[in-house]
Protein backbone atom coordinates (compact mmCIF):
# COMPACT_ATOMS: atom_id res chain seq x y z
CA UNK A 1 0.00 0.00 0.00
CA UNK A 2 1.21 3.53 -0.75
CA UNK A 3 1.69 6.44 1.57
CA UNK A 4 -1.37 8.37 2.82
CA UNK A 5 -2.74 11.04 0.51
CA UNK A 6 -2.78 14.32 2.44
CA UNK A 7 -3.12 16.91 -0.34
CA UNK A 8 -6.80 17.79 -0.90
CA UNK A 9 -6.40 18.09 -4.68
CA UNK A 10 -4.85 14.63 -4.85
CA UNK A 11 -7.67 13.28 -2.66
CA UNK A 12 -10.28 14.69 -5.05
CA UNK A 13 -8.48 13.27 -8.08
CA UNK A 14 -8.26 9.86 -6.37
CA UNK A 15 -11.99 9.88 -5.61
CA UNK A 16 -12.86 11.01 -9.15
CA UNK A 17 -10.87 8.10 -10.60
CA UNK A 18 -12.61 5.64 -8.27
CA UNK A 19 -16.03 7.06 -9.15
CA UNK A 20 -15.29 6.95 -12.89
CA UNK A 21 -14.20 3.31 -12.57
CA UNK A 22 -17.43 2.54 -10.72
CA UNK A 23 -19.51 4.26 -13.40
CA UNK A 24 -17.69 2.23 -16.08
CA UNK A 25 -18.55 -0.93 -14.14
CA UNK A 26 -22.21 0.10 -13.99
CA UNK A 27 -22.26 0.74 -17.74
CA UNK A 28 -20.71 -2.66 -18.43
CA UNK A 29 -23.15 -4.70 -16.36
CA UNK A 30 -26.14 -6.16 -18.12
CA UNK A 31 -29.06 -5.86 -15.69
CA UNK A 32 -30.58 -9.07 -17.06
CA UNK A 33 -27.36 -11.00 -16.40
CA UNK A 34 -26.28 -9.42 -13.08
CA UNK A 35 -25.99 -11.82 -10.19
CA UNK A 36 -26.19 -11.21 -6.47
CA UNK A 37 -22.38 -11.32 -6.22
CA UNK A 38 -22.17 -8.49 -8.77
CA UNK A 39 -24.55 -6.35 -6.72
CA UNK A 40 -22.68 -7.18 -3.50
CA UNK A 41 -19.39 -6.13 -5.12
CA UNK A 42 -20.87 -2.82 -6.27
CA UNK A 43 -22.18 -2.14 -2.76
CA UNK A 44 -18.72 -2.92 -1.38
CA UNK A 45 -17.14 -0.47 -3.81
CA UNK A 46 -19.56 2.30 -2.76
CA UNK A 47 -18.82 1.53 0.91
CA UNK A 48 -15.07 1.69 0.20
CA UNK A 49 -15.48 5.09 -1.47
CA UNK A 50 -17.56 6.31 1.49
CA UNK A 51 -14.89 5.12 3.92
CA UNK A 52 -12.19 6.87 1.89
CA UNK A 53 -14.20 10.12 1.91
CA UNK A 54 -14.55 9.89 5.67
CA UNK A 55 -10.82 9.14 6.03
CA UNK A 56 -9.89 12.15 3.90
CA UNK A 57 -12.32 14.35 5.81
CA UNK A 58 -10.86 13.26 9.17
CA UNK A 59 -7.30 13.83 7.94
CA UNK A 60 -8.05 17.45 7.18
CA UNK A 61 -9.13 18.16 10.75
Image (cartoon, helix red, strand yellow):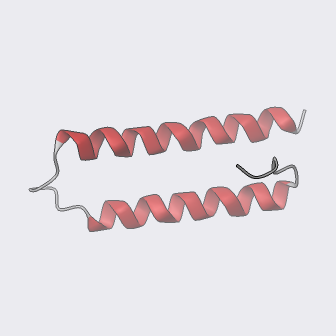
- For this orientation, the residue located farthest to the left is 32
Against 29, is 54 above or below?
Answer: above
- Residue 49 position in % (x across, y down): 57, 44
**Is 17 displayed left or right of 57 in the figure?**
left
- For the point 81% across and 51% down, the residue is 5
- Quarter of the figure that contains the C terminus: top right
- For the point 16% across and 45% down, the residue is 35
Picture quadrant of residue 52: top right
- Residue 18 position in % (x across, y down): 56, 58
- For this orientation, the residue located farthest to the front is 1
**Is 5 displayed left or right of 13 in the figure?**
right
- Residue 4 position in % (x across, y down): 81, 47
| Foreground residue among 5 and 60 | 5
Q: How many marks?
A: 0
Against 1, is 55 above or below?
Answer: above
**Is 34 displayed left or right of 41 in the figure?**
left
**Is 31 displayed left or right of 54 in the figure?**
left
- For the point 79% across and 61% down, the residue is 10
Picture quadrant of residue 14: bottom right
- For the point 64% across and 56% down, the residue is 15
- Residue 2 position in % (x across, y down): 75, 52
Amino acid sequence: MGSPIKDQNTQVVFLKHRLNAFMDLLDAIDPEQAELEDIDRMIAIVEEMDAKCREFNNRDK
